[in-house]
Image (spheres, rainbow, N blue to C red):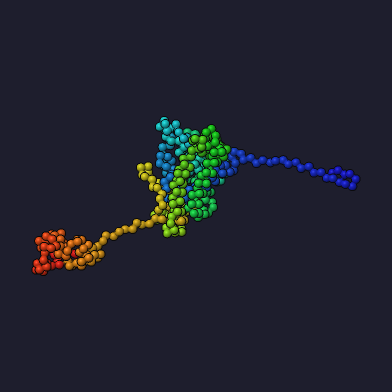
Amino acid sequence: VLERGRTSIKVTLSIVIPVLHFTGVGTPYHNDEERRLLCDVLTAATGVLRNATHNRQLTEAIYGANGGTMFNRDGGIAQEGNCVGTLRGRSMLCVHHKNSAHIRFGVGNDGCFAKSLLGTFFCVCTPGDKDVETLCGVKGLKSVGTWSGSFRGNGLNQNLFKDVWKGLNRSCYDKRESENDFRDQLKNLRTSVETVKQKMMRSKRNGFAILGERTSIPCNGTTSENICAAYQAKDGEPYIPWVAKIEGALEELEETAKSINSAPASEAPRKGAIVPNGENEGAALVLQGKGNEEAPGRDARLPPIQRESDNQTSEKTTKGELTGNQGDYYTEPTKRTKRNPTTTQKRHSASCIRPQRRRLFPKTSHVATLDRLAQLTNKTSTTNFRGDDSLSPTSWATQKHSSNNFPHC
């Protein structure tokens, strides 16, 4: 305070000290952003799959395909597949190479978990050796077990994956799903996939795009930094198999949606979500099947899995198969019934009226017509017919002929 006469001047000095908040290794919300991005893809993809239940590419993108690891809706492994033989460490399953050396040496595929959306969830959100309080927004995951290892590791624990998936499924569907138009669902799915790709492009290291918080390869789970999924870049961009399958499915479904949008007004679909071809199973929002003993809850949102073997031809989604909230284009074909002559034809005598005879034998007289009809039915001719002028009216009158000798007109 400076005083000069009666004037007082008070000077206050403020020192601003910036305080930075660092999120270090072992943060309570490790890989939470990655979990949110994957959840956006999952909710959008399963929403589309309920209205396109037979889309093979979309099903394989979520649950895995033949030849690789395939998952059930409860998170259990349905098929391990040809995945690097006995080398089933976490890193071998979560790091995907575009040209695997293991395949060339006949060992098998690598990155089998990273090839599907569910497998990527497990690579990013299954606890490793180091303790993380809250991994992927779910607390207490380590209490159910851990998963780590570069080559062999500690094996694949079915119960571990089921418990992890139970928590992740609830976190993905913590909000009520909106009943969007099918075209909006397709748009949301494409947007969520592009967001994941952009996130991974920003985290490229050593030629690999990595999904995980401050991660480094190998993704073996030995530290919290190694809880990740990695994809080797292809032509400068990360090649993510499940993303490629979703994009392929989107191209097909978006084209079908355009054809429905351009349909005539007379073919306008009814309101309400209708399952293709009347298969109500595809619209079930409740987990069904063996092994699901718990009552359906908030996390029971996944549609049934429609799988095909490799030797089966994939069913293409057609205009009749795409329904959703816009209604149904599937119609039963009109069946033609066999004509019954006894009910649809009128019986006539041989003495048909002149127009009917003329339709049978144009430019032919009445006598010639009757004679011709007799010949066609292997009856004895009423006359030795040689021409219209060779038969006189007198001789015709003396002929014995009955209407029973001739067919109906």
The answer to whether residue 126 is above or below residue 322 is above
User: Which residue is outermost to the right?
Assistant: 5
Front-most of 94 and 318? 318
Front-most of 182 and 95? 182
- Which quadrant, please, contains the C terminus? bottom left
- Which quadrant, please, contains the N terminus? top right
Q: Position of residue 294 (x, y in %)?
A: 46, 52
User: Which residue is outermost to the front?
Assistant: 389
Q: Residue at x 49, y 41 (%)?
A: 120
Q: Residue at x 37, y 42 (%)?
A: 310
Q: Position of residue 312 (x, y in %)?
A: 36, 44
Residue 242: tell me if it is visible. Answer: no
Q: Give left or right: position of 158 versus 359.
A: right
The number of callouts visible is 0
Q: Position of residue 25 (x, y in %)?
A: 59, 38
Q: Residue at x 11, y 60 (%)?
A: 386
Q: Give left or right: position of 345 versus 24.
A: left
The answer to whether residue 111 is above or below residue 344 is above
Q: Position of residue 289 (x, y in %)?
A: 42, 50
Q: Residue at x 50, y 47 (%)?
A: 189
Residue 330: tell me if it is visible. Answer: yes
The answer to whether residue 145 is above or below residue 184 is above
